[in-house]
Image (cartoon, rainbow, N blue to C red):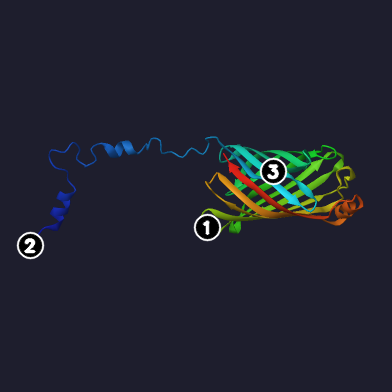
Amino acid sequence: MEGMDHSAMQHAAHEAPAGARSGDWSDGVASSMHGMDMMDMDDAAPVGMLLLDRLESFAGQGGHGQSWEAEGWYGNDTDKLWLRSEGEREGGRPRDGDVEAFWSHAVAPFWDAQLGVRRDVGEGPKRTWAALGLQGLAPYWFEVEATAYAGSGGRTAARVRVEYELLLTQRLILQPELEVNAYGKDDLRRGIRSGVSSLEGGLRLRYEIRRSIAPYVGIAWDHLVAGTAGLARGNGRRVTDRRWVAGIRLWF
């Protein structure tokens, strides 16, 4: 359009009308937005969670009973108090299990270093261990826990756990897991020989009625190896136990 002064039109477009309350069209709002009240990220705010990952009954070749696996934490993005427990009971009494308490400190995105204690419960002597571990999310979304233990009398132990969640649908989830336990010294009163002592695995299919409530069914197995397996045979115990399980997963 020949003859029109476009620069003058653009300049006029950026000017507020004569009767406007502010010359920059902001009406005083822009200067008050810099604070963004209630929109700041507070990484230091303490929060907590309790997860009952397994609360189940089992029926296997070696017997019937109940088992549990739970964890909870309280703290901020950097430091947390972290609690874990797992075990099983048969005949109305705990057969094997442990309770752990850690200070958990973030050392990298998705990874925490953990320092704490573990207490064994169930059959045999109640052992207490100092614990040092690493927990986090590995590539391809594998959840990993690796913990080393040191106890009285020169006892040492290690545990590695790996879990994965395969989403078949938004509510139907298949969860495989594997756990390896090893000990540095014989502990005959608890039925353990030095070296790798046991391999535990499971495959559980859960349906999330809500994210926080999910019943499941599955299969689990416990296999003793090396010297621990030989000790079990000598005591008339099974080396491999396969179990059908049914339970519920809850978090709060």
Q: On the image, numbered disc 1 is attached to which residue?
A: 169
Residue lying furthest left: 3
Q: Earlier in the sequence, mark 3 or mark 1?
A: 3
Mark found first going from the N terminus, 2 or 1: 2
The structure residue drawn at horizontal position 61% and vertical position 45%, both measured from the top left corner, is 249
- Name, please, the residue furthest toward the bottom: 2
Q: Position of residue 64 (x, y in %)?
A: 76, 47
Name the residue that disc number 3 marks: 68
The amino acid type found where label 3 is placed reads: Trp
Residue at horizontal 84 percent and vertical 43 percent from the top = 155
Q: Nearer the viewer, residue 6 or 71?
A: 71
Nearer the camera: disc 2 or disc 3: 3
Q: Which residue is mark 2?
A: 3
Q: Position of residue 192 (x, y in %)?
A: 86, 48
Marks 2/1: CA–CA distance: 64 Å
**Disc 1 on helix, strand or loop?**
loop
> Element at badge 3?
strand
Task: State the CA–CA distance, disc 2 to disc 3.
Answer: 84 Å
| In the image: residue 182, left or right of residue 26 | right
Question: Which amino acid type corresponds to the residue marked 1 in the rendered image?
Answer: Thr
Q: Give the camera-side residue of 170 and 113.
A: 170
Q: Residues within 10 Å of mark 1 (few under 14, many from 20)?
A: few
Question: Which residue is at the far right?
Answer: 234
Instruction: Report the quarter where the C terminus lies.
Output: top right
Which-is-in-front pick, marks 2 and 1?
1
- As shown in the figure, which amino acid type bears the numbered disc 2? Gly
